[in-house]
Image (cartoon, rainbow, N blue to C red):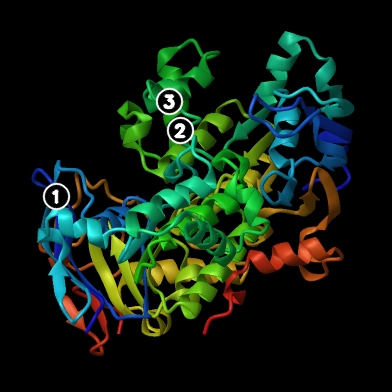
Amino acid sequence: MQFNSPPLLEVKDLCISYRKGGISSSIKGPVCAVKGVSFSVKPGETYAIVGESGSGKTSIAMSVIGFLRPLTGTIFFMNKNIWELDRSGLRRLRSNIQPVFQNSGASLNPRMSAGKIISEAFHAIVDEHEKEKALIDLLRSVGLDREILRRFPHELSGGQKQRLNIARALALKPRLIILDEPLSSQDLSTRAQLIHLLSSFKKAYLLSYILISHNLSLVRLISDRIAIMKQGVFIEEGATEQIINNPSNNYTKVLIEASNIKNVKTG
Amino acid sequence: MSLITAENISVSLGRTPILKDINFSVETGETLAIVGETGCGKSLLCKTLLNILPQSLSVNGNIWFNIADKKRINILSSGEQILKTIRGKEIGMVFQDAFASLNPVIKCGKQISDVLAVKSKTDHRTKKSRIFSLLEIVGLADVTRIYNLYPHQLSGGMQQRMALAIALAGNPRLLIADEPSSSLDSIAQKQYLDLLNRLKHAINLTLILVTHDLDEAFAFADKMLVLYAGYTAEYGNTVDIRTAPAHPYTKALLDIYQAFRENRQPTPLPGEIPSLGNPPAGCRFHPRCYRVQPACAEQAPPKKDLSGRHYTWCFNPIE
């Protein structure tokens, strides 16, 4: 991590609200999902946002990627306010910020082969031979065999799908990857593979990650700083070990306890 | 006598074996954890226990379930009339995706009421008080409000509790819970597991808990059945498996689990879980195994009895 360098991403006073739901919604008026959230991410840093379902974690991610316009607040990425960019500026931005979502299957087009999915990211390379070489190198870096190129998403395991998602995110050589619960639907051995991959890419490419999760024990392994989120606000933020070892907020203590099921009393 | 005993359960699709020679038994009040990774056949095994598999799959073996008066029936060879008295009444089931298992256009109270109407004939007032008590048992506060809500108006944790209330409505002696907490966040997960643990002791529930989370298995289970790609890797007492895993796959899982607990980078297992349609010959784990021997690639591994209550299926187990 580059401690003295300027932040890659700077979010200030972010507020995100949704209009009330459909005809069956019991909620009247706009729902404030994120209230006055500020944070920054440095090059090479992993910043984790941890909280329970519905706390607003994914809303922040959607806003940073440029999918969800905030009500108020600013998001500066590489010194540019992303919500003041025109369409082409936003397109350039998206090659530098890539998402990896929780549901690895739903984020892959079921009618495209793995090769087609990845090669879309290489559309700038005209030479077919060069494109195939780049593609195979990329697959190898995430531990996938070239044989996988012919397969469709339904023919891949959960871990292979998630590695394909990571490969697609890496294809454009981004500066920041937003990992929205990338491990929570994965098995133990797949989690170990993915954590290994993410850590090695972080070092190799000086990547920054925003890691969204509800599980502190996983977050602890790869993040430098943690923000604890509840009902749309950050209630605690700090260095990972400081938060885990000396939580100042009761909710953080509950989260730490819940992430460790060994505390379930038996007998 | 065991409440449920599975003998040589094999499930296949055409000539492709999906589950092969699964054996286990569960005593009354005991908890068995079925542990394994996605695609190893855990959910398929649960459906086999209730005999609700699609007709395209062929099943062999016996599932003996102990009913009243020390009589036992074979679930796999019983007719639909008998199975109707078993499913829901004797054996309840909670599925992984609670929302998908609830009817989206029927209010919560009515959904439990429908189950009660089938399982026992009671008047409206008794039925309503039974519904309220079931909702309270599963830890749902403000039961009169929940009674009139639709499933989409509940949070994920509440939906999972609703599914549990429905499963408990017929007073089952055996509850099969198929990854009941895996879709919940960590706080809801802990609350749900605490509830399940309380219920298990309060009503002497026999539990088959399907999970890929070793923490859950260790916290709850008396016995564990570790599956890998449709085969049993290891079966036995939880303490024995935890302290002295004999199968290299179980050992690898435990090493990863321990690394996470100690905040260390886990060492990933090499290779991939094999596809069930095209599994490797011999032991299905051998391409990823660090203790592999020539025989492992040629024939299915033999069962080894380690202590009379701990078994593994391996040519070269860890001793």
Outermost residue, bottom side: B307
**Quick check: marks 3 and 2 in contact, CB under 8 Å?**
yes
**Residue at 87% over, 65% down:** A248
Q: Is residue A147 left or right of residue B147?
A: left
Query: Mark 1, chain letter?
Result: B
User: In the image shown, does B316 or A161 lie closer to the viewer?
Assistant: A161
Secondary structure at badge 3 equals helix
Question: Could you say which quadrant of the image residue B74 lies in?
Answer: bottom left
**Residue at 21% over, 48% down:** B53
Type of amino acid at the residue the image marks with label 2 = Asp
Image spot of residue A127 (x, y percent) = 45, 12
Instruction: Tell me, for residue B12, which label it has, or none.
Output: 1
**Residue at 47% over, 26% down:** A134
Secondary structure at badge 2 equals helix
Discs 1 and 2 lie in a common subunit: no
Q: Which residue is mark 2?
A: A137
Image spot of residue A247 (x, y percent) = 82, 66
Residue A32 in sight in this render: yes
Instruction: Tell me, for residue A133, which label it has, or none.
Output: 3
> Of the residues tagged 1 and 2, which is closer to the observer?
1
Q: Separation of disc 1 and disc 3 at Cα?
A: 40 Å
Q: Is residue B266 above or below residue B54?
A: below
Question: Could you say which quadrant of the image residue B139 lies in?
Answer: bottom right
